[in-house]
Amino acid sequence: MILFDTHAHLNFGDFDADLDEMIGRARAAGVVNIVNAGYDLASSRRARELADRYDLIYIAVGIHPHVAGKALPGYLEQLEMLAAHPKVVALGEMGLDYFRDLSPRPVQRKVFREQIALAKKLNLPVIIHDREAHGDMMEILREDGPGLPGGVIHCFSGSWEMAKECIAMGFYISIAGPVTFSNASRLKDVAARVPLDRLLVETDAPYLAPAPNRGKRNEPAYVRYTAEEVAALKKMEPEKLAKICTENGRKLFRLP
Ligand code: NI
């Protein structure tokens, strides 16, 4: 299989002990590209070191909604400086998280909107995190989304109605490990319906390991389990599905 893990966090401490081996397992599984997503300024900065070290790793820089409350004045200028690295292919992850509510919601919305504006200025696609914030998310995407050079709703968790509207606005839908869980009937339904030319797969490693590794540390090699499940839902050959998703990712992130 040829796979693209379009969302991982490899600069979290979870991988310090076996980074080389983990990248080796990813290559052996057929992973040809990984987008390592920033979480705050420090992780966005460290992501660049990984990208310099491994040819298959590209990066996104951004402020996650969990830490939006800690974004200091000047953070946009810092992001812009970080985005000048040649392997930065997107801004993110950014968005809204009303499940854990770690930052005040008005601040989450403000920092999200400011990053969308920066993405337009820099002509970069966006990687969007949305958890239990579907209403406000769609309102912001309707108002601020037009003019973006593309984007992806990562680890999609909404309804098919929401997916349909995101697709109509030009966004990709990225499916993560939970689609392999037996109780994920709504997500399975969404994955089965998303048009092939709008579909991506990801791990969100180290989180959300797909079955059969549910509960363990996730890593990019496991993206194949997600691709296999989505292929089964679409009644397709896994190799074909994986190749199409890889091409979609390379197109969205404009990889050479
Ligand atoms: Ni993430």
Image (cartoon, rainbow, N blue to C red):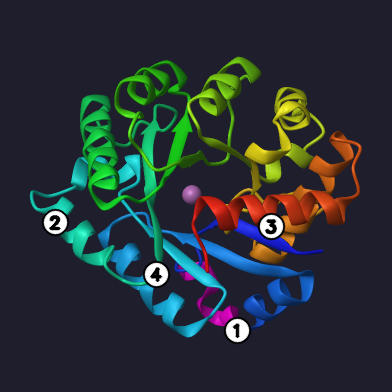
Q: CA distance from mark 4 to mark 3?
A: 23 Å
The image shows residue 152 at horizontal and vertical percentages of 50, 41
The image shows residue 183 at horizontal and vertical percentages of 78, 28
Depth check: 163 or 101 in front? 163
Residue at the location (28% across, 36% down)? 112
The nearer-to-camera label among 2 and 1 is 2
Circle 3: is it few (<14), some (14-19), or many (20+) Cα within 10 Å?
A: few
Q: Are marks 4 and 2 in contact (CB under 8 Å)?
A: no
Q: CA distance from mark 2 to mark 1?
A: 33 Å
The nearer-to-camera label among 3 and 2 is 2
Instruction: Please name the amino acid that badge 2 sits on.
Output: Glu
Q: Which residue is mark 2?
A: 77
Mark 2 / mark 1, whichever is N-terminal: 1
Instruction: Please name the amino acid that badge 4 sits on.
Output: Ala
* Residue 93 horizontal side relative to residue 85, left or right: right
Instruction: Please name the amino acid that badge 3 sits on.
Output: Lys
Circle 4: is it few (<14), some (14-19), or many (20+) Cα within 10 Å?
A: many
Magenta stretch in the rendered image: 12-19
Query: SS for tag 2?
Result: helix
The image shows residue 2 at horizontal and vertical percentages of 76, 64
Q: Is residue 212 above or below residue 47?
A: above
